[in-house]
Image (cartoon, rainbow, N blue to C red):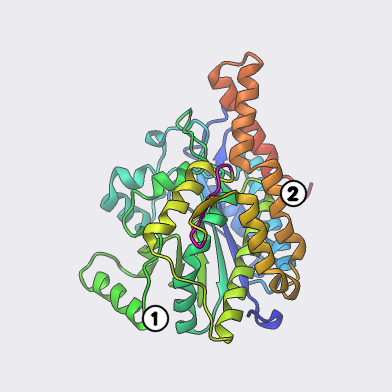
């Protein structure tokens, strides 16, 4: 289990910069915007950095020791990013795709890592007009980290389903709740993680790729969850970025509690049953396609089960972990997400309501952007505001 005194967590979020008049992406935002953010954010709160595309920003909290601390820091980071954007006539939206922007019109950041990525991956990289949320949970021991990596794959679709925020792509309702994964999966070394008998085996596999000149280091392995190459953490990467600030905290808390539950089992020489990627991939697809709506396969029962029932089972499994980590309120809020829908549900509803009211398709899509701008700052205080 994770003891409260040993618990560490960090959250990274990626945002899109939009023009509030055209509602399109700001393909060429002023460099001073990022510089202002970086000057305003102190290291004890976190950091802000450029992302692959110039229309993106990434923020990341410093190491936190509770969900309450994480809430305070992530709220501050969203607020700083939003204030800097407003100072330059722009807005930020937390969504994993933009409702109608064209990837062909975006510019990538002039940075060695991104220049290499664009040159190596060509259009596959240039299409990466997507944003995600990453959650780091500190696990100091290498072998423990590897053991949990093997077991956590089962739960990844359940977490994805709670986060979906990318139903649109280039002005079309894709019919998927997380179209972001369709884009991201075009890259190599993505998807569900491999399973390894030891951390040493994992390192040997990475070394093969490095020696062959395929990658520089393990940061170029983009699995849905991975051992971080920079920190002694397990990094959750499958989730869309949540438009509503509190939803992201709920998913982070639920992930932390699942990790803690698996550690409890490990202390009793027990473990979660390992399922093949072939099976887990089916639930990953269902979460990507349907989100919360059509249930997932319970492999033990051999049947599709409604998502609310599966969620209640997970909440029961991690109840004592949530008590210990002081995040009972956060994980119970998962029920609220199920009740009102994720950002993807709400975006489609805004779009369809606008059409029903007589709006043209382009105006309906702009209404979605307006909703995203407002919803991104729900529960967030802007500095100086």
For the magenta stretch, what is the residue range?
A: 293-300
**Tag on residue 23?**
none
Other-residue count near label 2 (Cα within 10 Å), few / some / many at <14 / 14–19 / ≥20? some
Q: Find out whether residue 295 is within the magenta segment.
A: yes
- Identify the residue shown where x is 67% and y is 52%: 247
Frontmost residue, 288 versus 270: 270
Q: Which residue is mark 1?
A: 199
Element under label 1? Answer: helix
Chief SS of the magenta region: loop
Q: In the rendered view of the protein, which quadrant contains the N terminus? A: bottom right
Residue sitting nearer the eye, 16 or 334 = 334
The residue at the point 38 percent across, 61 percent down is: 277
> Where does residue 125 sit, x and y in percent of width and height?
34, 47
Dot 2: what SS?
Answer: loop
Residue 233 coordinates in the image, percent (x, y): 52, 74
Taking the view exactly as shown, the residue that stands out farthest to the right is 385
Q: Residue at x 63, y 13 (%)?
A: 358
Q: Nearer the viewer, mark 1 or mark 2?
A: 1
The disc placed on residue 382 is 2
Query: Compared with residue 219, is residue 207 higher up or lower down, i.e. above or below?
Result: below
Whole-percent x, y for residue 43 in the image: 63, 68
User: How far, Cα to Cα, is label 1 from label 2?
Assistant: 43 Å
Q: Which is more N-terminal, label 2 or label 1?
A: 1
Q: Quadrant of residue 354?
A: top right
Residue in view at x 35 percent, y 43 percent: 126
């Amino acid at each position: 289990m994770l003891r409260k005194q040993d618990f560490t967590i960090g959250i990274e979020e990626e945002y899109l910069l939009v023009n509030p008049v055209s509602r399109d992406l700001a393909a060429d935002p002023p460099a001073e915007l990022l510089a202002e953010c970086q000057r305003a954010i102190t290291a004890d709160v976190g950091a802000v950095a450029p992302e692959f595309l110039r229309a993106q920003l990434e923020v990341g909290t410093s190491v936190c020791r509770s969900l309450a601390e994480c809430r305070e820091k992530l709220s501050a980071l969203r607020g700083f990013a939003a204030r800097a954007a407003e100072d330059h006539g722009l807005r930020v939206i937390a969504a994993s795709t933009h409702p109608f922007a064209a990837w062909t019109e975006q510019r990538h950041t002039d940075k060695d890592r991104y220049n290499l990525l664009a040159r190596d991956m060509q259009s596959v990289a240039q299409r990466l007009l997507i944003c995600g949320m990453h959650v780091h949970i500190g696990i100091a021991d290498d072998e423990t980290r590897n053991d949990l990596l093997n077991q956590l794959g089962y739960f990844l679709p359940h977490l994805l389903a709670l986060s979906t925020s990318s139903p649109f792509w280039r002005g079309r309702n894709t019919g998927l709740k997380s179209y972001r994964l369709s884009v991201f999966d075009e890259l190599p070394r993505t998807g569900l993680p491999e399973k390894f008998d030891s951390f040493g085996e994992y390192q040997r596999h990475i070394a093969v790729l490095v020696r062959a000149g395929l990658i520089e280091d393990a940061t170029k392995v983009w699995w849905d969850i991975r051992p971080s190459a920079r920190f002694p953490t397990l990094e959750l990467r499958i989730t869309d970025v949540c438009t509503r600030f509190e939803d992201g905290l709920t998913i982070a808390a639920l992930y932390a509690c699942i990790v803690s539950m698996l550690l409890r089992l490990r202390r009793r020489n027990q473990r979660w049953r390992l399922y093949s990627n072939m099976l887990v991939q089916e639930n990953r697809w269902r979460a990507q396609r349907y989100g919360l709506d059509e249930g997932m396969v319970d492999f033990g029962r051999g049947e599709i089960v409604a998502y609310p029932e599966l969620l209640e089972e997970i909440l029961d499994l991690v109840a004592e972990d949530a008590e210990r980590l002081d995040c009972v309120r956060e994980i119970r809020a998962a029920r609220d997400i199920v009740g009102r829908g994720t950002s993807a549900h709400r975006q489609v509803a805004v779009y369809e309501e606008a059409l029903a009211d007589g709006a043209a398709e382009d105006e309906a899509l702009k209404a979605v952007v307006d909703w995203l701008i407002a919803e991104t700052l729900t529960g967030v205080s802007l500095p100086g505001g």
